[in-house]
C-alpha cells in the first residue's frame, strides 16, 4: 500500500501535466507551426494568420489513447487558416520533436472569409480615423477628432456574386467626449469601408448630419458616480477553508464524480472533451460527452434602413469567441474561491498571444438544494434530510464590441451539465431627433430608450455543438411527444397526456421546433438499465423563440442555425460550424440547414446534438445606459442513465 502510494506520487511528480490529444497548442507549438508556414510560403504580399488551433485527432485514436492514457501521446497536428494574395489558405501542419512539417495546403475557393484578427481591426480603425474625409466630416460637425473612436462592423451578405474577393468591413464612429460610454453616442451618417487585405479605405460616405445624444448620466465607471447612490449590501465572500475539491493536471480536470478535458480555442472559446462520470453503483467511469463547445452566435439587427440593414453578425466565426475573450477580474467576474487560467492563441503575425485569466473554475454554492425531504407521515418521528447543491463552474467572458457574453459550463453531482448564457454590456444606440415617444410617427425599429436614442430590435441566437457519446459512440435521438388522450369514459377524468415515442432515423426527422410539448432524449439503444430502460440523457432546451425573418431573406440563409432548436448530425470531424466555417460575408452554403439536407442515417450511430437557444431583444429603458444581465441556458440531464439518483450516495454536509 505504502509502496503504491509512493509510486503514484512519483509518477505524478514525474508527469505533472501529462498530455492529452485535445491539449491546446502551446505557445511554442504555435510558434513552430506559424514559422513553418512562413518559411514554406512564397510571400508576395502580406500574410495574416486568422486561425491556429489543433487539428482534431481521429476519434478512434483518441478513444484508444484514453483507454490507456499512459501510452505515448498521439501525433500533434495544427490546422491553420491564413490570408495571402487575397486568398484564404488552409494548412495542416504536423509537429514533432520541435519541428513543423506542412502535411497539406490548399486554397479555399468557396464563399465567405475567415475570422477577423484583432490586429487588422485596430489597423482598419486607425486608418479610418486618419482618413482626410473622415477628419473633415468630424470637423464639419464641430467634433474634436481626437475624441472620436472607431469600431469594425462586418457587413453580412446580401446576394452579391459568389466571386466576391474583397474582404471588406465598415468602420463606424463614436464619440468619447465626457463619457466612456461610446456605444450610446454614435456619430451617425459617417462611415468608411476598409479592405482588410490591402488595408486601404475603399469607400467613404457622409450621408447625413444626425444629433449626438447627450453624454450626461451615461458614464458607467464606479469612480465617476456622484450621490445619491443605490442601497448597499454588506460584503459577501465565498470561502473554502480546505481549498478547492477539483484537481487539474495539465488540461485534465477531476471534480467529484466528473472527469473531463478542458481546452480553449480562439474561435469557440471553452471546449470540454472526453467528459465521463463515475457511477458509484457500477464502480466505473461512464462516458457522457466526447466534445462540446459553442459553435456560432448569430446576432441580426432588425433595422432595414441603409445605415443599419447589414448588421447581421456571426460573432464566433467573424470575431472569435476565444480571441475576443477578456481577462477576468478575480473576486468579481468569478467568486473569491475561483482559480484562473491563462490561454494562448495565434496572433495575426503568427506569434502566440497570451490571454491572462482567460477562464476561471470554481465550486459554486448558491444556497441551493440538490435534494431534500421532510417526512412527517411517520408518527412520532420527524425526519429531515438535505443535500446542498455544490457544482463546478467553468466561466469565460467574451466581449464583442458593445456586448459581453458570460458563458458558463456547470457540472453537477447528479450527472447534469448545465449551460448558462448571460448577456450584458451596453446596448448599441441609434440616434434620432426625437426626445419623447409622442413625437414618433414613423417606424423606428426599436424603442426610444433615452432622449435622441433608439435601442434597435435584434436577436441573439447561440448554437452549441454537443457530441454526446453515452456509454459508447452509437447513440440515437428520440422525441417523447407529450400527446393528449381522451379516456374511454370509465373514469371521471375526460383526458390525460402520455408520451408517444418517436425515433429519429434520419437527420431531417430530428430537427425540432419548440412549439409542441416534447421530451428530447439522446439514448444508447444498445444499453438498458437493469429494469429495461434505455440509458440516456435528456436535453432540457433553453429559450428559443422562432426567428421572424423570411426564409429567403439573406440574414436568415446565413443564420439558418435558428430555423430549429435541435439538429442531429452523424459525427463528422469536418462538421463543427452551425453557420459554416467561413461566415464573414458567407452565403450560408454550409449551415446546419444545408448539412442536414443530406438526410443521413442517425439511428444507432455516432451522433452530434446541436442546440440553439435564442433571445429576441426588444430594448427597454431599464437597459440604458448599461444593460442588466439577461440569462438563459439549458441542461443535459441524465435520464435512465443511472440505476437510481446518485445523490443518494452523497454524504450529508
Ligand atoms: C516558392 O517559389 C519557388 C521559386 O519560385 C518554388 O520553387 C517553390 O516551389 C515555391 N513554393 C511554394 C510552396 O509554392
Ligand atoms: C481635443 O481633445 C484633446 C484630447 O481630449 C484635447 O487635448 C484638445 O485640446 C481638444 N481640442 C480642442 C480644439 O478642443
Ligand atoms: C463576378 O461575376 C459577375 C457575374 O458573373 C461579373 O459581372 C463580375 O465582374 C465578377 N466580379 C469579379 C470581382 O470577378
Ligand atoms: C463530412 O463533412 C464534410 C463537410 O460537410 C463532407 O464534405 C463529407 O462528405 C462528410 N463526410 C461524410 C461521410 O458524411
Ligand atoms: Cu440584445
Image (cartoon, rainbow, N blue to C red):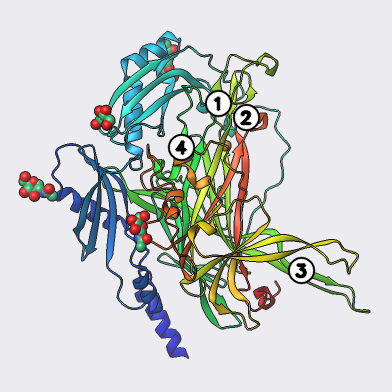
Within 10 Å of the Cα at label 2, are there few (<14), some (14-19), or many (20+) other Cα atoms? many
Numbered badge on residue 429: 1
Assess mark 3: CB under 8 A from ligand 5?
no
| Furthest-front residue in this view | 488
Judged from the image, the secondary structure of the residue bearing numbered disc 2 is: loop
Q: Residue at x 49, y 47 (%)?
A: 561
Question: Which one is closest to the eye, mark 1 or mark 3?
Answer: 1
Within 10 Å of the Cα at label 3, are there few (<14), some (14-19), or many (20+) other Cα atoms? few
Relative placement, left or right, of 505 versus 234 is left
Q: Of callouts 4 and 1, which one flags the residue occurring earlier in the amino acid sequence?
A: 4
Q: Which residue is mark 4?
A: 313
Image coordinates for residue 51, horizontal then vertical, percent: 32, 48
Q: Of callouts 3 and 4, which one flags the residue occurring earlier in the amino acid sequence?
A: 4
Q: Of callouts 2 and 4, which one flags the residue occurring earlier in the amino acid sequence?
A: 4
CB contact under 8 Å: marks 2 and 4: no
Q: Does 189 appear above or below 2? A: above
Q: CA distance from mark 3 to mark 4?
A: 45 Å
Q: Does 277 appear above or below 560? A: below
Q: Of callouts 2 and 3, which one flags the residue occurring earlier in the amino acid sequence?
A: 3
Q: Of callouts 1 and 3, which one flags the residue occurring earlier in the amino acid sequence?
A: 3
Q: CA distance from mark 1 to mark 2?
A: 9 Å
Q: Which residue is mark 3?
A: 372
Amino acid at each position: 500500500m505504502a509502496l503504491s502510494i509512493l509510486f503514484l506520487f512519483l509518477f505524478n511528480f514525474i508527469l505533472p501535466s501529462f498530455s492529452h490529444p485535445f491539449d491546446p497548442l502551446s505557445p511554442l507549438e504555435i510558434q513552430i507551426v506559424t514559422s513553418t508556414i512562413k518559411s514554406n510560403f512564397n510571400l508576395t504580399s502580406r500574410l495574416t494568420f486568422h486561425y491556429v488551433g489543433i487539428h482534431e485527432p481521429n476519434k478512434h485514436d483518441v478513444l484508444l489513447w484514453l483507454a490507456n492514457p499512459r501510452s505515448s501521446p498521439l501525433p500533434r497536428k495544427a490546422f491553420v487558416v491564413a490570408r495571402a494574395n487575397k486568398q484564404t489558405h488552409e494548412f495542416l501542419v504536423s509537429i514533432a520533436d520541435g519541428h513543423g512539417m506542412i502535411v497539406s495546403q490548399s486554397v479555399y475557393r468557396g464563399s465567405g472569409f475567415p475570422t477577423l484578427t484583432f490586429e487588422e481591426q485596430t489597423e482598419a480603425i486607425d486608418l479610418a480615423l486618419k482618413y482626410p474625409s473622415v477628419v473633415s466630416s468630424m470637423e464639419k460637425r464641430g467634433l474634436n477628432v481626437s475624441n472620436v473612436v472607431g469600431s469594425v462592423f462586418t457587413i453580412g451578405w446580401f446576394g452579391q456574386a459568389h466571386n466576391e474577393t474583397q474582404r471588406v468591413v465598415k468602420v463606424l464612429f463614436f464619440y468619447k467626449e465626457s463619457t466612456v460610454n461610446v456605444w450610446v453616442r454614435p456619430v451617425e451618417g459617417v462611415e468608411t469601408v476598409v479592405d482588410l487585405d490591402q488595408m486601404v479605405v475603399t469607400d467613404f460616405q457622409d450621408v447625413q448630419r444626425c444629433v449626438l445624444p447627450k453624454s450626461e448620466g451615461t458614464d458607467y465607471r464606479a469612480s465617476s458616480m456622484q450621490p445619491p447612490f443605490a442601497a448597499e449590501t454588506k460584503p459577501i465572500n465565498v470561502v473554502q477553508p480546505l481549498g478547492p475539491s477539483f484537481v487539474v493536471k495539465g488540461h485534465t480536470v477531476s471534480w467529484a464524480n466528473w472527469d473531463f478535458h478542458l481546452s480553449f480555442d480562439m474561435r469557440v472559446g471553452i471546449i470540454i472533451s472526453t467528459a465521463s462520470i463515475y457511477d458509484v453503483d457500477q464502480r466505473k467511469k461512464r462516458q457522457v460527452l466526447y466534445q462540446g463547445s459553442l459553435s456560432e452566435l448569430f446576432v441580426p439587427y432588425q433595422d432595414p434602413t441603409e445605415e443599419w440593414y447589414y448588421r447581421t453578425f456571426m460573432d464566433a466565426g467573424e470575431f472569435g469567441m476565444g480571441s475576443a475573450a477578456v481577462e477576468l477580474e478575480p473576486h468579481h467576474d468569478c467568486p473569491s474561491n475561483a482559480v484562473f487560467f491563462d490561454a494562448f492563441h495565434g496572433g495575426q503575425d503568427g506569434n502566440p498571444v497570451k490571454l491572462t485569466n482567460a477562464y476561471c473554475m470554481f465550486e459554486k454554492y448558491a444556497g441551493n438544494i440538490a435534494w431534500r425531504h421532510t417526512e412527517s407521515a411517520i408518527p412520532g418521528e420527524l425526519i429531515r434530510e438535505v443535500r446542498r447543491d455544490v457544482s463546478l463552474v467553468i466561466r469565460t467572458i467574451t466581449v464583442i464590441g458593445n456586448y459581453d457574453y458570460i458563458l458558463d459550463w456547470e457540472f453537477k453531482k447528479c450527472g447534469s451539465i448545465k449551460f448558462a448564457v448571460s448577456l450584458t454590456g451596453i446596448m448599441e444606440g441609434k440616434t434620432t431627433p426625437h426626445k419623447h415617444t409622442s413625437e414618433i410617427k414613423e417606424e423606428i425599429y426599436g424603442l426610444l430608450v433615452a432622449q435622441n436614442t433608439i435601442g434597435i430590435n435584434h436577436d441573439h441566437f447561440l448554437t452549441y455543438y454537443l457530441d454526446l457519446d453515452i456509454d459508447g459512440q452509437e447513440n440515437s435521438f428520440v422525441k417523447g411527444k407529450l400527446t393528449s388522450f381522451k379516456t374511454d369514459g370509465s373514469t371521471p377524468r375526460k383526458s390525460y397526456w402520455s408520451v408517444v415515442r418517436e425515433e429519429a432515423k434520419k437527420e431531417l426527422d430530428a430537427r425540432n421546433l419548440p412549439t409542441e410539448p416534447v421530451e428530447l432524449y439522446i439514448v444508447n439503444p444498445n444499453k438498458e438499465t437493469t429494469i429495461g430502460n434505455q440509458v440516456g440523457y435528456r436535453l432540457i432546451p433553453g429559450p428559443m423563440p422562432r426567428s421572424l425573418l423570411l426564409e429567403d431573406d439573406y440574414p436568415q440563409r446565413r443564420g439558418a442555425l435558428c430555423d430549429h432548436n435541435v439538429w442531429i448530425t452523424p459525427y463528422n470531424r469536418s462538421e463543427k460550424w452551425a453557420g459554416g466555417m467561413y461566415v464573414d460575408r458567407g452565403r450560408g452554403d454550409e449551415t446546419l440547414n444545408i448539412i442536414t439536407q443530406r438526410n443521413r442515417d442517425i439511428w444507432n450511430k455516432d451522433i452530434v446534438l446541436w442546440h440553439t437557444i435564442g433571445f429576441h431583444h426588444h430594448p427597454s429603458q431599464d437597459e440604458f445606459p448599461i444593460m442588466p444581465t439577461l440569462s438563459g441556458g439549458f441542461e443535459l440531464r441524465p435520464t435512465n442513465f443511472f440505476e437510481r439518483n446518485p445523490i443518494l450516495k452523497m454524504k450529508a454536509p
